[in-house]
């Protein structure tokens, strides 16, 4: 070989080791960073896709059971008696359920119930009697509580259905529409079992369903429910039905709207 061939090891000892290519390092760092970002994005996107798939797999039958449980737990049958424009009365009914001498109710408890169940805020004032017999609860704005007036000599409207049957459930976008059929019995208003708490829309004569208990006579729910189930195709659009529109907020159901459907609709 002609000429002088430099000793590379000797050159490194004299000049120091060969410096790495900075441009190449920058490129490699950028590629690695980009790959990490892509992996993270795919991981999070995959989680959301799985969550959506799980939500979509929940059947409407399963959802209807959950919504019916929500209605039962929050004592929302009282809407049938008090209406959707009287949420304070509905809240008080739930808070006082099973409580003896429930004559003073915290406004904070009422506010919390309305927020959790309906995702609403209301302006508090006196609560009128549902049968037009004056003020039922007066609102004490100083002490932030509702006080029972006690000046009522009539039977209360029943706010617990004897039997509830799911009529239909529909999914509309991200909301659910549930329609329920209910049977009520209020002997102070009617001798009939009706589809409303006021004893107006008749279904059965209660005499056909009474049986003797330790406390006297009461409706035989086993017989009543069996008969209603067997004849539901003929009765599902008879009388009054109740339509609930639910949404999901922060992982739990809220009741956005409530309607009463009459037998001519």
Image (tube, rainbow, N blue to C red):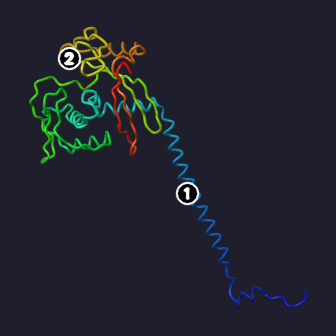
Q: How many numbered marks appear? A: 2
Image height of 98 relative to 252, above or below: above
Dot 1 alpha-carbon crowd within 10 angstroms: few under 14, some 14 to 19, many 20 or more: few
Residue beneath disc 1: 40
Query: In x, y percent, where is residue 204?
Result: 30, 11
Quarter where residue 128 is shown: top left
Mark toward the start of the polypeptide (2 vs 1): 1
At x 24%, y 21%, the residue is 198
Image height of 151 relative to 237, above or below: below
What is the secondary structure assignment of the residue under circle 2? loop
Query: In x, y percent, where is residue 228?
Result: 36, 15
**Residue 50 relative to residue 187: left or right:** right
**Residue 199 relative to residue 138: left or right:** right
State the residue in front, 159 or 226: 159
Q: Are marks 2 and 1 in contact (CB under 8 Å)?
A: no
Residue most toward the front?
264
At x 57%, y 53%, the residue is 42
Q: Quadrant of the C terminus?
A: top left
At x 26%, y 25%, the residue is 160
3D distance between C-alphas at marks 2 and 1: 65 Å
Identify the disc placed on residue 21.
none
**Residue 257 relative to residue 96: left or right:** right
Residue beneath disc 2: 189
Query: In x, y percent, where is residue 202?
Result: 29, 14
Residue most toward the top?
208
Query: In x, y percent, where is residue 224?
Result: 32, 14
Q: Quadrant of the N terminus?
A: bottom right
Dot 2 alpha-carbon crowd within 10 angstroms: few under 14, some 14 to 19, many 20 or more: some
């Amino acid at each position: 070989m002609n000429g002088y061939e430099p000793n590379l090891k000797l050159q490194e000892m004299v000049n120091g080791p060969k410096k790495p290519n900075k441009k190449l390092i920058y490129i490699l760092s950028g590629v690695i960073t980009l790959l990490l970002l892509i992996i993270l994005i795919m991981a999070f996107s995959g989680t959301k896709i799985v969550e959506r798939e799980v939500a979509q797999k929940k059947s409407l039958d399963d959802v209807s059971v959950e919504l019916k449980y929500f209605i039962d737990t929050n004592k929302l049958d009282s809407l049938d008696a008090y209406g959707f424009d009287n949420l304070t009365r509905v809240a008080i009914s739930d808070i006082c359920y099973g409580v003896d001498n429930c004559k003073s109710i915290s406004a904070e408890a009422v506010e919390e119930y309305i927020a959790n169940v309906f995702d609403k805020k209301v302006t508090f004032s006196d609560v009128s009697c549902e049968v037009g017999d004056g003020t039922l609860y007066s609102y004490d704005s100083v002490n932030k509580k509702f006080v029972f007036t006690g000046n009522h000599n009539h039977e209360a409207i029943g706010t617990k259905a004897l039997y509830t049957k799911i009529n239909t459930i529909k999914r509309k976008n991200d909301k659910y529409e549930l329609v329920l059929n209910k049977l009520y019995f209020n002997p102070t208003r009617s001798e009939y079992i009706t589809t409303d708490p006021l004893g107006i829309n008749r279904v059965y004569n209660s005499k056909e369903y009474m049986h003797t208990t330790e406390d006297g006579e009461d409706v035989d729910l086993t017989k009543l429910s069996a008969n209603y189930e067997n004849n539901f195709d003929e009765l599902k659009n008879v009388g009054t039905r109740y339509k609930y529109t639910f949404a999901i907020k922060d992982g739990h159901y809220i009741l956005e709207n409530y309607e009463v459907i009459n037998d001519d609709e």
